[in-house]
Amino acid sequence: MLIKNTAKKVEAMLYKTPILRDDDNRLVANYWYKEIGPGLIDNMSIIDFLTKYSTGQLTSADTITRARRKVQENNPSLRGEKWEDRHTLAQEMKEDIVSW
């Protein structure tokens, strides 16, 4: 259920902010910013942030990026400019491994 909720939020972010489609670090940072809330994060120390993250109060970066991959798999219009390049390279790597 967490991945579905995360995917819905990620999908909305990819629609609204296309630059996030190719930049997982920026996507995760924006996701956490929205998750914590602008008013709270502005006054949060790094210790507070790390405590929230390490105790599971924030969605993990892996879950957010997994949701992004799933959203882009299901909705080609949300794929970034680098998506095709990444998948072409992945296919070439598979072929190289098989022929090795």
Image: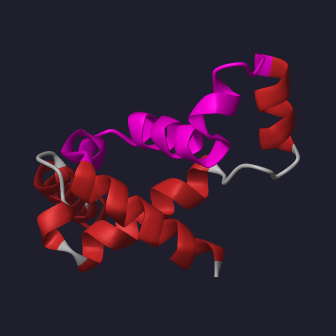
Q: Is residue 52 visible?
A: yes
Note whether 9 is above or below 55 in the view shown.
below
Q: Is residue 93 visible?
A: no
Would you identify the image quadrant in which residue 69 lies? bottom left
Q: Which residues are magenta?
A: 17-46
How many numbered badges does the structure rendering display?
Answer: 0
Q: Residue at x 72, y 49 (%)?
A: 58
Note whether 18 is above or below 64 in the view shown.
above
Note whether 13 is above or below 70 in the view shown.
above
Relative to 90, 38 lies left or right: right
Q: Residue at x 21, y 51 (%)?
A: 86
x then y, percent, for residue 95: 20, 64
Question: Which is nearer the eye, 57 or 79?
Answer: 57
Would you identify the image quadrant in which residue 20 lies? top left
x then y, percent, for residue 33: 55, 37
Could you tell me which quadrant the C terminus lies in?
bottom left
Would you identify the image quadrant in which residue 83 lies? bottom left
x then y, percent, for residue 71: 33, 70
Q: Residue at x 66, y 41 (%)?
A: 36
Relative to 28, 88 lies left or right: left
Relative to 32, 17 lies left or right: left
x then y, percent, for residue 18: 20, 46
Based on the picture, tell me whether residue 21 belongs to the magenta stretch: yes
Note whether 60 is above or below 19 in the view shown.
below
